[in-house]
Image (cartoon, grey):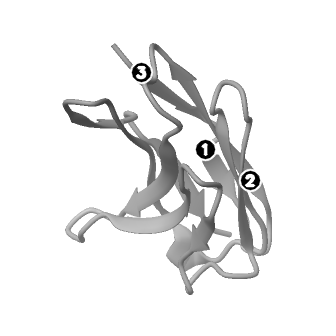
């Protein structure tokens, strides 16, 4: 069973930085796409950034130039470096992993970590 465990959330002042980390455990059949999403209560969950199985990075326009996603090549630990944080970045951040085998597609979510940007 694949499990994702997020860490690194917290309270930060506007303009500050945080680094989120997503640790992956369990058996992965193929090189996965790993991603960070975020959700504000009452809103849909939105993609923040992802790294595909082929290594392509996609970053939402709202965080372009401020957030950087990176991944460990061996265990797929996926980090999100967030700089110049704004109050509108306040949300619960979720780690996501998508992979596949010959027979099935798989998708997993972490439990989420709260990020609050406030003075």
The residue identified by callout 3 is 3
Q: Position of residue 93 (x, y in %)?
A: 47, 52
Q: Residue at x 49, y 41 (%)?
A: 32
Q: CA distance from mark 2 to mark 1?
A: 7 Å
Q: Quadrant of the N terminus?
A: top left
Residue in front for this viewpoint, 109 or 39: 109
Q: Residues within 10 Å of mark 1 (few under 14, many from 20)?
A: some
| Residues under numbered marks 2 and 1 in contact, where contact means CB atoms less than 8 Å apart | yes
Q: Horizontally, is 43 left or right of 59 in the view? A: left
Q: Relative to 32, say whether 46 is above or below.
A: below
Task: Please tell me the numbered disc located at residue 9.
Answer: 1
Q: Earlier in the sequence, mark 1 or mark 3?
A: 3
Q: CA distance from mark 2 to mark 3?
A: 23 Å
> Which of the two marks, 1 or 3, is nearer to us in this view?
3
Residue in front for this viewpoint, 80 or 106: 106
Q: Residues within 10 Å of mark 3 (few under 14, many from 20)?
A: some
């Amino acid at each position: 069973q694949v499990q994702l465990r997020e860490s690194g959330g917290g309270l930060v002042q506007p303009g500050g930085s945080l680094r989120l980390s997503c640790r992956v455990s369990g058996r992965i059949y193929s090189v996965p796409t790993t991603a960070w999403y975020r959700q504000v209560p009452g809103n849909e969950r939105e993609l923040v950034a992802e790294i595909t199985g082929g290594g392509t990075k996609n970053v939402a326009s709202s965080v372009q130039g401020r957030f950087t996603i990176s991944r460990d090549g061996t265990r797929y630990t996926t980090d999100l470096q967030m700089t110049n944080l704004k109050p509108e970045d306040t949300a619960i951040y979720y780690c996501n992993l998508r992979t596949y085998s010959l027979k099935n597609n798989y998708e997993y979510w972490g439990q989420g970590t709260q990020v609050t940007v406030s003075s």
